[in-house]
Image (tube, rainbow, N blue to C red):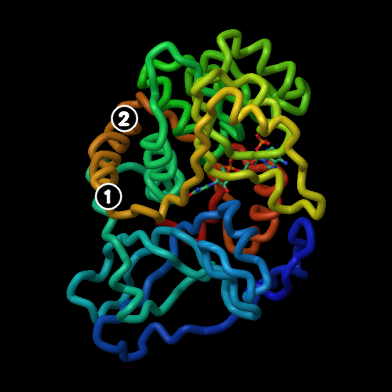
């Protein structure tokens, strides 16, 4: 459950609490409802934004106090009173961080059956084939991926960044990434085939971008904000594009970073576009995404790195750890065996 709005980083057993309760799995269901057994739930940076005072409006609803935290995930239908879902179906949707959940007829409308024709691990439907992978695909429709031009991606080894970088590579770009650990940098270079990558904690972004982006930056995928964004404004080329996906360095800070080089937007005619993946969650791009990416993962052309915490008892550590950069790959909780 979410129990207290945090100031700065969330605190274990203070911001959230592990609570136990019982769900009657034999209960008679309302017409259209289902009961699911949750298999994997996602851990995402935007959940920090939902840990706010409910009076503050934003694109995702605030978590209710003393109520379960929820997020995207995959679950198995264990009881059904809904003709669209049969017992045993694996469904993608928004689930509570709980072992079982009764899904109301209204909520059941938003579930999607996971067909998984490729027989991939179901965890992929939380990461590369779930919201973060879709974010990468959709976000890239907002800027050009020109052959030979330079793309720079921050938080590049994370859930979104690793897919963005590999898509830019496929589209012929020169791809550079930053990450906060040497092992993450190795993953980008050796598995994701980035052209260059650096540990921004060892090499400051300003110097590193000069070194690793000798031809400047044409496309910046913004995941972190702060000092990195400032450095990008300096390294960006004329008429470059910044796709603003997130600014995680600002999510837990009580003193926001003051960007100094923003004037470059004018001088260099930079186009900076923010977006939320839910903006067009039913567009043609969704079909394009599912027609392409599962096959690439299946045949090994696209690498997927996941960081899976076992059991809800480890959910708090995993969530707070992700905000601190301890996750290596897509963070999620394995709630139950597939
Ligand atoms: P990640 O898997 O990348 O996990 C978060 C990572 O952020 C950490 O592992 C850490 O990596 C990095 N990080 C944490 N703190 C800082 C900091 N102070 N400065 C720099 N990097 C930091 O998360 P996601 O891939 O799920 O999300 C990436 C971004 O995309 C986030 O900003 C998120 O809010 C955004 N997002 C936006 C969506 C949209 O619709 N607009 C949808 C989904 C995500 P490292 O060790 O490399 O520092």
Compared to residue 142, the image places residue 126 above or below, namely below
- Give the quadrant of residue 234: top right
Q: Which residue appears at 39% of the width and 83% of the height?
A: 25
Reading the chain from its start, which is encountered first: label 2 or label 1? 1
Residue ID for mark 1: 283
Q: In the image, is 195 to the left or to the right of 224?
A: left
Q: Which residue appears at 73% of the width and 37% of the height?
A: 259
Residue ID for mark 2: 296
Residue 77 visible from this viewpoint: yes
Q: In the image, is 101 to the left or to the right of 250?
A: left
Extreme-front residue of the structure: 267
Q: Position of residue 335 (x, y in %)?
A: 51, 61
Q: In the image, is 330 to the left or to the right of 27?
A: right
Q: Secondary structure at mark 1?
A: loop
Which quadrant, please, contains the N terminus?
Answer: bottom right
Q: Which residue appears at 34% of the width and 54% of the height?
A: 281
Q: Position of residue 220 (x, y in %)?
A: 54, 28
The residue carrying pointer 1 sits among few (fewer than 14), some (14 to 19) or many (20 or more) residues within 10 Å by Cα, namely few
């Amino acid at each position: 459950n979410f129990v207290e709005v945090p100031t700065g980083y969330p605190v274990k057993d203070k911001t959230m609490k592990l609570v136990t309760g019982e769900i009657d799995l034999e209960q008679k269901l309302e017409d259209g409802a289902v009961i699911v057994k949750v298999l994997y739930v996602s851990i995402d940076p935007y959940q920090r934004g939902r840990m706010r005072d409910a009076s503050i409006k934003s694109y995702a609803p605030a978590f209710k106090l003393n109520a379960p935290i929820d997020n995207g995930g995959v679950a198995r239908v264990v009881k059904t009173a809904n003709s669209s879902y049969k017992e045993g179906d694996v469904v993608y949707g928004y689930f509570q961080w709980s072992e079982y959940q009764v899904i109301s007829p209204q909520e059941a409308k938003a579930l999607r059956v996971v067909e998984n024709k490729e027989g991939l691990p179901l965890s992929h439907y939380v990461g590369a084939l779930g919201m973060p992978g879709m974010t990468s695909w959709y976000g890239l429709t907002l800027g050009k991926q020109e052959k030979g031009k330079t793309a720079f991606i921050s938080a590049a080894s994370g859930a979104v960044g690793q897919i963005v970088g590999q898509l830019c590579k496929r589209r012929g770009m020169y791809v550079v990434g930053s990450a906060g650990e040497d092992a993450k940098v190795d993953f980008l270079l050796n598995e994701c085939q980035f052209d260059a990558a650096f540990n921004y904690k060892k090499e400051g972004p300003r110097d590193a971008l000069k070194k690793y982006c000798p031809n400047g930056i044409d496309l910046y995928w913004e995941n972190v904000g702060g000092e990195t964004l400032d450095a990008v404004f300096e390294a960006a080329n004329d008429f470059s594009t910044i796709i603003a996906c997130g600014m995680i360095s600002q999510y837990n800070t009580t003193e926001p970073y003051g960007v100094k080089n923003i004037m470059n937007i004018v001088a260099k005619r930079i186009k900076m576009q923010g977006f939320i993946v839910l903006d067009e969650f039913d567009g043609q791009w969704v079909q394009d995404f599912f027609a392409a990416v599962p096959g690439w993962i299946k045949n090994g052309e696209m690498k997927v790195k996941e960081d899976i915490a076992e059991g809800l008892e480890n959910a708090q550590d995993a969530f707070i750890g992700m905000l601190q950069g301890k996750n290596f790959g897509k963070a999620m909780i394995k709630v139950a065996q597939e």
